[in-house]
Image (tube, rainbow, N blue to C red):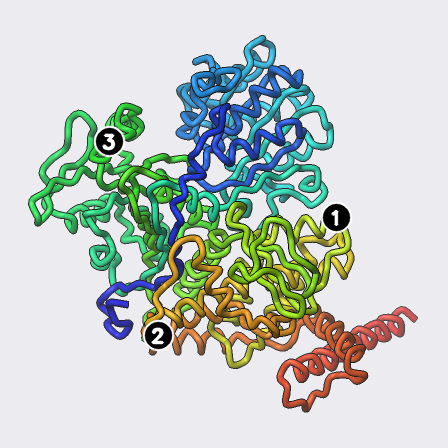
Amino acid sequence: MSEQANNPTNAYTVPSVSIATACTGASSKANVLGMRTMQERAYAKRGEQYLLIKSPPASGKSRALMFIALDKLNNQGLQQAIVVVPERSIGGSFADEALSQHGFYWDWQVAPQWNLCNAPGVDEPRVAKSKVDAVRHFLESTDKVLVCTHATFRFAVEELGVEAFDNRLIAIDEFHHVSSNPDNKLGSQLGAFIARDKVHLVAMTGSYFRGDSEAVLGSADEAKFETVTYTYYEQLNGYHWLKSLDIGYFFYTGPYVNAISKVLDPALKTIVHIPNVNARESLKDKEREVNEIMHGLGEWKGVDPATGFHLVETKEGGTLKVADLVDDSDSAKRSKILNALKDPAQKNNRNHVDVIIALGMAKEGFDWIWCEHALTIGYRSSLTEIVQIIGRATRDAQGKERSRFTNLIAEPAADQSAVAEAVNDMLKAISASLLMEQVLAPRYEFTPKDAGPQDGFVYNDGEGYQEGRTNVGVNEATGQYHVEINGLAKPETAEATRICKEDLSEVVTSFLQDKTALERGLFDKENTLPEELTQLRMGKIVRERYPDLNEADQEAIRQHAIAAMNITQQAKLALAHADANGGGMAQGSTALLDGVRKFVNVRDLDIDLIDRINPFEAAYAVLAKAMDEKSLRQVQASIAAKKVSIPEDEARELAKRALQFKNERGRLPDINSADAWEKRMAEGVAALARYRARAKAAQGQGASSNG
């Protein structure tokens, strides 16, 4: 780390995630039908009525949908396809494509009048009537494809009813905008479509989770979807040019415009997202903020009349072209800038623009392949938004070898009496970073010890599978690791098995969005036992997420999810330790595997060991190095002061764990035990007894008063 934490005037990095890629070129190779790897994988499931595609930004989801939709229209008897996107600007992703030129059977064509994202007017009820009428006319026509926004689609379903869309394909882009919450209108409408069962649905997202912790789909509806998963690990390793992706958060004190020059490198193609005017980091004057950022880059020299870009001369004598998407005072000027950014003739011109400054725009669906640095000031609105912003910098482009995401966060000042808001922002930034580690990690295949080798995996550095040891296998083609864990619970049902294979990232995401787990795991280490996080908090999250599964399946999912998170974190710690001792960071797609090997004792890896590791240990190790010591102590004190007595649901779970302890040891946990976890289980039993006694007493009082 080049700058020291004890210099409060400087911003400095927390190097949270750094992934080196293998540059195999596999993710951009096309088959005879013109399909890249992810598109081919999705097309193989084209016959499914309900299809969910989980795939990172830039992996080709839009074109994958085109292939699938054209087959449904031409071979599966569907009348029409309706593509639904969250913003009008994303409608361009579904413009005409001459797919037959690359070997496919048909071309993708959208008649101009049916791309409603290009129609004038905003998506709100007063103006949307004409667009709803357009949807009605489309449904009555013999034309095949319509593109509209989520808002237009919601209004159309409200007015026309779900039955009007029978025998049609509905494709929802950026599916994480949907929620199972009854107040989410699009989510409720999709539930009605699924209940009627007369349409085909294709859902696409690069981040299958929401910032508000709500489930995207209810478990019953989700079970109807066939899932196609293409991971960030596969995507990045399959690029031609991009060799590394760095993700970090920087702390600063004072106004952010004074600190931004520490992290804004004018030599990098950069998207800067300034804070919302209501955010703590905002100076409450967005125009001033943009001007100060440009002033930090150099001397303003005017505006390019053709594009509307600002021209800024740097100290080195070069000229930067800066696109200001924050100023919305002149709609004509703003339209000129947007049109210049979307100009297809300039897509492959690296020198077309250098810096884009935005507030609410240039996030999901915004395609600037040359972007090398996504810089965000303050925490945005959700983890989903952070993942989407990172996706702006992960496009592959000739000569672009490195990209990065930076989250600039205000450090809690040590002299503040109230640090709650600052701590919340910090927790969200750390949570986003940890989530990206999980997203970037390969997929795990966990089995109990001595389960036998799995097809396609190479074990123990090519030594082969060996009985009696913990085996670690890797399948480079699929980006999966097989790790054996002694004592690991096996899922009993097909649904639980599917979750353990495909949905661990979603479970871990819910855990990372649990504020209590983050606070206690990071800043209350003295009073919080790892098992309280790995067993109690994760156990509660799994039960709430999958209430219809039996206890054995819930426990299996909990163990698999904690194993995925803790093995990734411990691998990162092992790599950092090796690097600090002169071993050098591993490169290429084997980097995490090398860390896993360093962590895994080939004879001793078991689920009890994994449960005894604080999942935030690696994050805390980095934070303690980077954060001002006085501020860190104050944050720790503020979190520790919030500690409360054991809540009833936690006491009940501790009592269950105590019963398991008794079944294994022949005795109940001892409240005076030197083992902290045994003592906590005993405290849970005592607390549950007190809750039951109070309930019984209250019941008795109620009975006597009624008598």
Q: Which mark is residue 494?
A: 1
Please state which of the two labelled residues, at mark 2 or mark 1, is closer to the viewer: 2
Please state which of the two labelled residues, at mark 3 or mark 2, is closer to the viewer: 2
Q: Is 503 drawn above or below residue 304 in the view shown? A: below
Q: Is residue 509 visible?
A: no
Circles 3 and 2, Cβ within 8 Å, touching? The answer is no
Measured Cα–Cα span from mark 3 to mark 1:
50 Å
Instruction: Judge by depth and name the residue closer to the eye, 661 or 458.
Output: 458
Find numbered disc 1 in the image and state the secondary structure of the residue it sits on.
helix
User: Callout 3: 10 Å neighbours few (<14), some, many (20+)?
Assistant: few
Circles 3 and 1, Cβ within 8 Å, touching? The answer is no
Pointer 3 residue = 349
Measured Cα–Cα span from mark 3 to mark 2:
43 Å
Q: Is 229 drawn above or below residue 156 in the view shown? A: below
x and y percentages locating residue 339 in the rendered image: 29, 26
Instruction: Judge by depth and name the residue closer to the eye, 304 or 228.
Output: 228
Q: Which mark is residue 581?
A: 2
Find numbered disc 3 in the image and state the secondary structure of the residue it sits on.
loop
